[in-house]
Image (spheres, grey):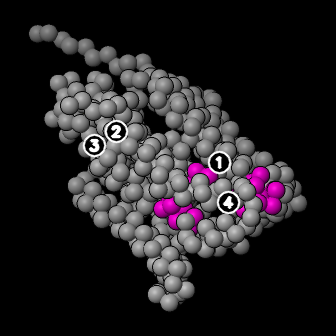
Amino acid sequence: MNIVTLTIPQEVVQSNVPSWLERLGAALTTMGAIVFVLGSTGAFETVPILYSVISLIVSGVGILLLTVPAGLRVTSSSMNTNVMRSPVRRRGLAGWSLGVALTLFYILLYWFPETLVHVVASLEPLSRLIRNSPADRWFLYGTLYTLAVLVFGVRMLVRYRHSRYHLLRTVSLITAQLVFAYLLPSFLAAMGEPELYVHYFWPLKYDYIFPSSLSSMWSSGEGLTQFFAVWTVAMTVVITPILTYFYGKRWYCSWICGCGALAETVGDPFRQNADTSLRAWKIERWMVHGVLLFITVVTVMLWLDHVYDNVVFGSLAQRLKDIYGFVIGAMFSGVIGVGFYPIFGSRVWCRFGCPMAAYLGILQKYMSRFRITTNGGQCISCGNCSTYCEMGIDVRAYAQRGENIVRASCVGCGVCASVCPRGVLRLESGAKQR
Ligand code: SF4
Ligand code: SF4
């Protein structure tokens, strides 16, 4: 009788055992989180700087120590090791607790900001330094958001260091968040200019082409603000379709967008929790296109009212605008979109609620050169690609048929290609062969 000996690769055995650095990282992260919660009660009111330094920097360093050594152990062939056994990453008690904590934070931020007054106060010196104005809850949110993208961005760079594509797009996402979403608006505020976000356009930043916004930007007489009015319209109706024709929606969703930056960095550990069922896909199509239709109708109504002196829809357009802002802008994009990362995956907002994703998706499906090509003969049906697709696309089904993937929802993150052990998948934007 032949005896077959199975050898478990060393990296698989070792990756279960946390190193002393990871244990230190876990301790620092926990300490930072405890100080953050304690500080929100006013416990460190007399030493606000110490509070922000300890809670934010210590937990940031903790997360780095926790994730970087683990990322360094990951080789291109062991990317999926132990993922499905992790209680944080696979909807265990720790994952649910994290989801509840994130959701709670968003609820406090949007509807009970007075509970965060001490946390906001701790950022007063930083706000004065870079914005020349008092800190508020949105400055707190922007600071936390940017820090999270930076810290988890380093994790991405280490974990996906074998792929030039991931290195470049992660650097792009970090830079867009740090420069365009955090520093530039802060400097504009310091100069007394409106806080403009040059990388957000309609329909994601839905109010940028509302008549009230455009007319106030234009009538300001400031060259920079007038340039921005032209910029935001040109990006929406001209440059976005052109870039999507050449590169698909990935140029925005996986390289520039702030929501994409958080999803691709903080959300990456949870990408395998996306629902891949047919039912989820049907719900997704109705919801995301419904949101796009909603904001398009509201925008057209506001413009008609503007042109005809408010006699067409009266207050209805304004009411619908407010409903959209509350339900989609606040509840969906923040509370559900990010709070539910550990439960439903990293792209809940992008899949089910983002009107920009819907707009780009229509362009991608019907007029783009972007597709994922498959070499069906090499596919071993392992399913890694489908498991790690954050948009819940059944990539394997296409690979098995050797069919190109041209899907409206694909954000071109490229992770399906990275986790494929057989090199079956390729992201391509070249001219299609006849
Ligand atoms: S199909 Fe691949 S590239 Fe597209 S979203 Fe899914 S994992 Fe990312
Ligand atoms: S395409 Fe690659 S990852 Fe997907 S099932 Fe086939 S071999 Fe596995």
Mark drawn on residue 226: 4
Residue 323 vs 206, above or below: the answer is below
Residues at marks 2 and 3 touching, judged by CB atoms closer than 8 Å:
yes
- Asked whether the viewer can see residue 384, the reply is no
Left or right of 202: which side holds 34?
right
Residues at marks 3 and 1 touching, judged by CB atoms closer than 8 Å:
no
Front disc: 4 or 3: 4
Kindly identify the amino acid type of the residue bearing the numbered disc 4. Gln
Where does the image place residue 196, in percent across and percent down from the top left?
67, 58
The boundaries of the magenta stretch are: 186-208
Kindly identify the amino acid type of the residue bearing the numbered disc 2. Phe
Where does the image place residue 249, in percent across and percent down from the top left?
41, 46
Q: Which residue is mark 1?
A: 180
> Label 3: how many residues lie within 10 Å, few (<14), some (14-19) or many (20+)?
some
The residue under the point 20% across, 13% down is 4
The residue under the point 46% across, 25% down is 163
Residues at marks 1 and 2 touching, judged by CB atoms closer than 8 Å:
no
- Asked whether the viewer can see residue 370, the reply is yes
Kindly identify the amino acid type of the residue bearing the numbered disc 1. Phe
The residue under the point 51% across, 84% down is 308
Q: Which residue is mark 2?
A: 370
> Label 4: how many residues lie within 10 Å, few (<14), some (14-19) or many (20+)?
some
